[in-house]
Image: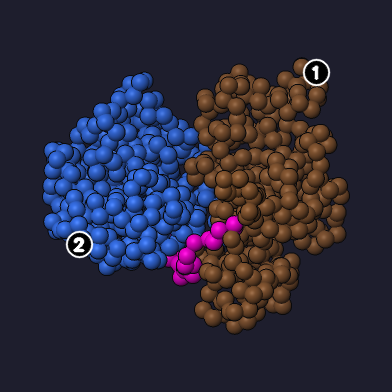
Amino acid sequence: MSNTMSSASSILQLNNLVTEFDTDEGRVRAVDGVSFSLNAGETLGIVGESGCGKSVTAQSIMRLLPQPMGQIVSGEILFQGLDLAKLPLEKMREIRGAKIGMVFQEPMTALNPVHTIGRQLAEVLLLHKKISKQQALQQAIEMLDKVGIPSPDIRMGEFPHQLSGGMRQRVVIAMALACQPQLLIADEPTTALDVTIQAQILELIRDLQRDMGMAVILITHDLGVIAETSKNVVVMYAGKVAEAGTAYDIFDRPSHPYTQGLLASIPRLDTAPKSRLAIIPGMVPGLLDLPKGCRFENRCPHRRDGCLVATPPMEHISDTHRLACYRWREINAAAGESLT
Amino acid sequence: MTDQTTQQTPLLEVRDLKMHFPVREGIFMRAARFNRAVDGVSFSIAPGETLGLVGESGCGKSTLGRCITRLYKPSAGQILFQGQDISQLSARQLKPLRRDIQMIFQDPMESLNSRHTVGDILEEPLLVQKIGTGAQRRQRVAQLLDLVGLPARSVTRYPFEFSGGQRQRIGIARSIALNPKLIVCDEPVSALDVSIQSQILNLLIDLQQELKLSYLFIAHDLAVVKHTSDRIAIMYLGKIVETGPGQSIYQNPQHPYTQSLISAIPVPDPHRRSQRVVLTGDVPSPINPPSGCSFHTRCPRATPLCSEQTPLLMAHEGSDPGVLAACHHIGVANPR
């Protein structure tokens, strides 16, 4: 399957990535056999709840796992054909920031509070480009202008705490994009922001993506943000891919009971007020005591004894749409009947 | 709902409420300027009703909630609870009132004492108010746990042993311990995962019907507020800019800020990649709010009038019944 997915335009391909952590209570597998591919210029959304492994997947790609606890155990991370999982760290430093940019949830933690905005931006440029300090400062101003920061020359001399949350996130995006990376990894980039500011930032990422032709991995728990931005979507649950496909596959024809439950449980502006929301009972299993069979088994309305025995394999519904559920055919058939 | 509210005596009526925090600066720490967090807010809540309060960070919605629970003493204005003005009562005078007005906080980990067992946490309001004997209180605690869907054995456990959703259930159980009439819910689900959020929202709606509660439901997520509320008030920089029945606010918003807020919400439907009204700029500081209409600096309809005169919250021709908005240009052809 992974072979058929690779094509000339694929910029990033994960094959069976396994990442583990050493904890006080033992070794846990935070990412367990995750595969997906991303084409140049496209946006892939990774959605899931806390602890599903979406951020660890991003940290694995960037090779920024907390050390020494986190480790990529097996699998491939092919970035433009190069396997990042096995790349020496000094080689990785040349890629990070230059070819792959990243944006995190809380911009204050990504910025150094004691250095000016200008110094931090110029540092990225000086690190990866052979340019003079003057040129770096000039390019930094241009970059701030590009991400929509008013009077960028003044902002260059300011410190992170002098900016609002939305402005700080713009600075982080400017830093991530300073070297024109081919891939941007954005981990909950708008979660800490207000909706009107979120709209600005998402629009900004989309505009810059169009101008610079970069691919984007957008990690979020917000299904609305995914639907608005992503061409393809990966739904993760307890370290595994539950379902993946185009945004239309996932939102129009969700076929994994977890995806179905997630979509049914969000209040929407057009549902009747005070009506009962669908719920997914219980909670995500801890990584230390994962069920032997399907990981969603303890919360699934369609569970059968067979689900408890072994992990369901990834199956393809169509060329673009795949999922890991033993019973998807029956569930889809039943849903089709109830529609007609 | 709005028809009923005009006929019934409201449970809570807030009149021109202001909360100005002094900003102390300079070597003498003089309060030269004020943060006008809440700046002239009026609304009412009927028995059994939910008023949703929506706004972005810094708009004053949490401060307003804390004034109503009297965690803050407001600078001016009236808070009439069952007809009695509670805005300036002393701590001693407030004590009996605490039974009637309770609060649910955003982060249950921060609002629950981590050194107390769940049993202690739930018994404390009863102890403070000197209600019942030890046996009766223990019985009440068991009843509360049952009401919020937690197992009886939780009594001897500590908050850290629970997941985020369960901790919020503990917070909810504590808030209903004294049979309150009004609960101020300040972002009760925004720290929770999507699949847990719906469990808590269902619980809040069930409890409201069972216990005839009124809610002031504060959140930044308009979809969540719309789902739980009878009426909605939209706040911007310390003022309510629009209020009305949830359905009207969503389908026929009048104020340009409400319109942009609704259009900014990402809809979980890839067929509806929205035509957004993206607002430019940030929310101005409440320490130095813009003159006139405080939204004029970001408003697509702003004219010179807007920076001179503060618009009043009032009914406008052509808007739905019960909808009030504060804008000079409602009903005027939309420039967009």
Question: In the rendering, what colour is chain B?
Answer: brown
Q: Nearer the viewer, residue A204 or A284?
A: A204
Quarter where residue B297 is shown: bottom right
- Per the model, the C-alpha gap separating discs 1 and 2 is 77 Å
Which residue corresponds to mark 2? A135
Horizontal and vertical percent position of residue B298: 53, 69
Q: Residue at x 49, y 70 (%)?
A: B277
Quarter where residue A249 is shown: bottom left
Q: Which residues are magenta?
A: B269-287
**Dominant secondary-structure state across the stretch colored magenta:** loop
Q: For mark 2, give the secondary structure.
A: helix
Horizontal and vertical percent position of residue A307: 38, 33
Which residue corresponds to mark 1? B133
Screen quadrant of the N terminus of chain B:
bottom right
Q: Residue B284 magenta-drawn?
A: yes
Query: Left of B49 or right of it: where is B145?
Result: left
Q: For mark 1, give the secondary structure.
A: loop
Residue A73 vertical placement versus B244 (above, below): above
Horizontal and vertical percent position of residue A217: 30, 52
Q: Nearer the viewer, residue B240 or B156?
A: B240
Question: In the rendering, what colour is chain A?
Answer: blue
Whether residue A131 can be seen here: yes
Q: Identify which amino acid the numbered label 1 is placed on.
A: Thr
Q: Residue A12 magenta-drawn?
A: no
